[in-house]
Image (spheres, rainbow, N blue to C red):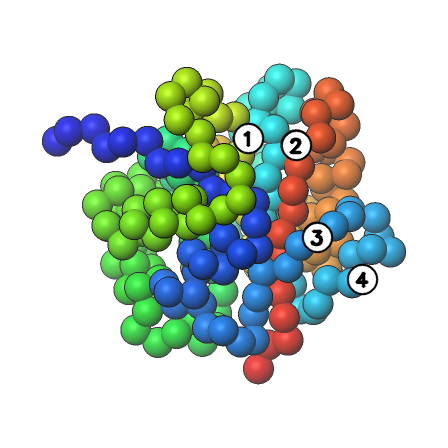
């Protein structure tokens, strides 16, 4: 089979994420994507609750990437519990992978019945994370959604060498119960070894923000290419 063209990176934008998610099965209400303008504790209070998932764009390079690789090698960091996870095999697809991790770990009642998202989840459940990646590569409505929304953002669409050298990367944080029934903060990144257990969690947004403040930003060597978006809103 001919190699597929690299996808164009998604912009870290609530509008872009909404344009991607709504046609595929995220209802207009009650959940929506919200900008997290600051990681300061006081400012986090302005984000509507409950927060169901957090998406982070960050610089996956240099010292920070080295820390992530080291963490992957420690089996004690692996999440032991039930969470939906997919590996990333398509270059520059991390935005769509992050959105899938955020949306397909929602209660199914939060998505439209019979939607493309739920159809894909049902088809993927018997598969391992690599086989899910192959299924994603073969599912045209996701590549079409990604391409359409990547071109709708306000940022210039990269081409040529710029498309080859993208190293800003999306991941998702969710809450999930481990095998002991404890609620944990779980990092989901298709480029990592698997779901990572980031510790106990009582408040998804605050716990994710704390992790980024304490681990990601200090290891980014002054790089400020960070952006955080929450999937939030009053659930019915």
> Can I make out residue 165 in this image?
yes
Nearest the viewer among 208 and 93 is 93
Earlier residue among tags 1 and 4? 4
Earlier residue among tags 1 and 3? 3
The residue that disc 1 covers is 168
| Secondary structure of the residue carrying numbered label 1 | strand
The mark lying in front, picked from 4 and 2, is 2
Label pair 1/2, CB-CB below 8 angstroms: yes
| Secondary structure of the residue carrying numbered label 3 | strand
The residue that disc 3 covers is 36
The image quarter in which residue 34 lies: bottom right
Nearest the viewer among 5 and 195 is 5
Query: Which label is found at residue 147?
Result: none
For marks 1 and 3, give the CA distance: 18 Å
Earlier residue among tags 1 and 2? 1
Badge 1: residue crowd in 10 Å (few <14, some 14–19, many ≥20): some
- Name the residue located 45 percent from the left edge and 22 percent from the top edge: 162
Badge 4: residue crowd in 10 Å (few <14, some 14–19, many ≥20): few
The residue that disc 2 covers is 225
The residue that disc 4 covers is 45
Work out which quarter of the rendered image holds the N terminus and state it: top left
Label pair 4/2, CB-CB below 8 angstroms: no
The image quarter in which residue 67 lies: top right
Work out which quarter of the rendered image holds the C terminus and state it: bottom right
Earlier residue among tags 2 and 3? 3
- Name the residue located 58 percent from the left edge and 21 percent from the top edge: 61
């Amino acid at each position: 089979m001919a190699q597929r063209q690299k996808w164009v990176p998604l912009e870290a934008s609530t509008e872009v994420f909404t344009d991607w998610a709504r046609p595929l099965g995220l209802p207009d209400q009650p959940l929506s994507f919200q900008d997290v303008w600051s990681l300061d504790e006081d400012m986090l209070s302005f984000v509507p609750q409950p927060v169901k998932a957090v998406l982070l764009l960050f610089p996956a390079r240099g010292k920070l990437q080295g820390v992530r690789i080291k963490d992957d090698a420690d089996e004690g960091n692996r999440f032991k519990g039930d969470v939906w996870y997919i590996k990333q095999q398509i270059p520059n697809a991390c935005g769509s992978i992050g959105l899938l991790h955020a949306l397909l770990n929602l209660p199914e009642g939060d998505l439209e019945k019979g939607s493309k998202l739920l159809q894909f989840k049902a088809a993927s459940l018997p598969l391992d994370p690599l086989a899910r990646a192959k299924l994603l590569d073969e599912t045209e409505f996701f590549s079409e959604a990604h391409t359409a929304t990547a071109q709708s953002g306000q940022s210039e669409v990269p081409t040529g060498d710029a498309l080859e050298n993208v190293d800003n990367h999306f991941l998702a944080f969710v809450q999930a119960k481990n095998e002991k029934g404890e609620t944990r903060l779980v990092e989901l990144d298709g480029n990592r070894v698997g779901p990572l257990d980031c510790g106990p969690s009582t408040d998804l947004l605050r716990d994710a923000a704390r992790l980024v403040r304490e681990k990601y930003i200090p290891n980014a060597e002054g790089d400020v290419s960070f952006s955080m978006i929450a999937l939030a809103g009053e659930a019915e």
